Image (spheres, rainbow, N blue to C red):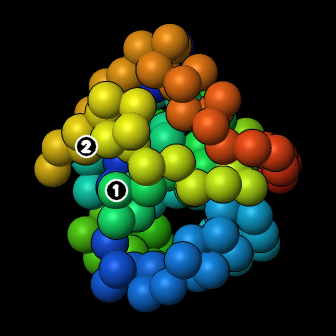
Amino acid sequence: MDGRIIIYGVSEEVFPAEQDLVDYLSKDLFRENQSRFRYTQCKDAGKIVISWKGLSYGHLIVTGKVKSTDEDIEDFPPAKCTYLVKSSAVYENPVRLRDVGIKVGSFGTSITEGQFEGITNRAGQITTHSGL
């Protein structure tokens, strides 16, 4: 995948509580979803920062993207694209994106490497989890 960094927001409908998202990033993505992040958009990205309620909880390192299969859609019906995830990172301190000058749009937000560093610098300890 390319070096593009995108922020995608996830909803309370999918992740009702903060811990649900943390569990997904740290284990469920790999154990239950076989390193497949299903999403409603299909932009090229090498890293995907995950946002929930304006806070970033972590990011994904992506190795590719594929058209969502029937199984992907069964798991997440609005899926249009499935990203293949090499690893995830969970932040010790969720980062309020507006504090680093980022507003997440409805269709994802591209950010620079400098903005990404601004996020990770505020994240505290970052725990990495491996997939593929």
> Residue 1: image x %, image y %?
54, 20
Q: CA distance from mark 2 to mark 1?
A: 7 Å
Name the side, left or right, on which 93 lies relative to 110. Answer: right
Quarter-of-image position of residue 80: bottom left
| Image vertical order of residue 93 relative to residue 76, above or below | above
x, y percentage for residue 132?
79, 46
Query: Where on the picture, by quarter, is residue 101?
Result: top left
Do the residues bearing badges 2 and 1 touch, measured as CB atoms within 8 Å?
yes
Name the residue at the front extreme.
99
How many numbered marks does the figure carry? 2
Residue 44 as seen in the image, left or right of residue 65: left
Return the residue at label 2: 104
Q: Is residue 70 left or right of residue 29?
A: left
**Element assignment for label 1:** loop
Q: Is residue 43 visible?
A: no
Three-letter amino acid code at the position of disc 2: Val
Question: Which residue: 54% across, 25% down?
Answer: 118
Q: Position of residue 16 (x, y in %)?
A: 43, 87
Q: Circle 1 is placed at which residue position?
A: 54
The relative height of residue 57 versus residue 28 in the rendered view (above or below) is above
Mark 2 lies on a secondary structure that is: loop
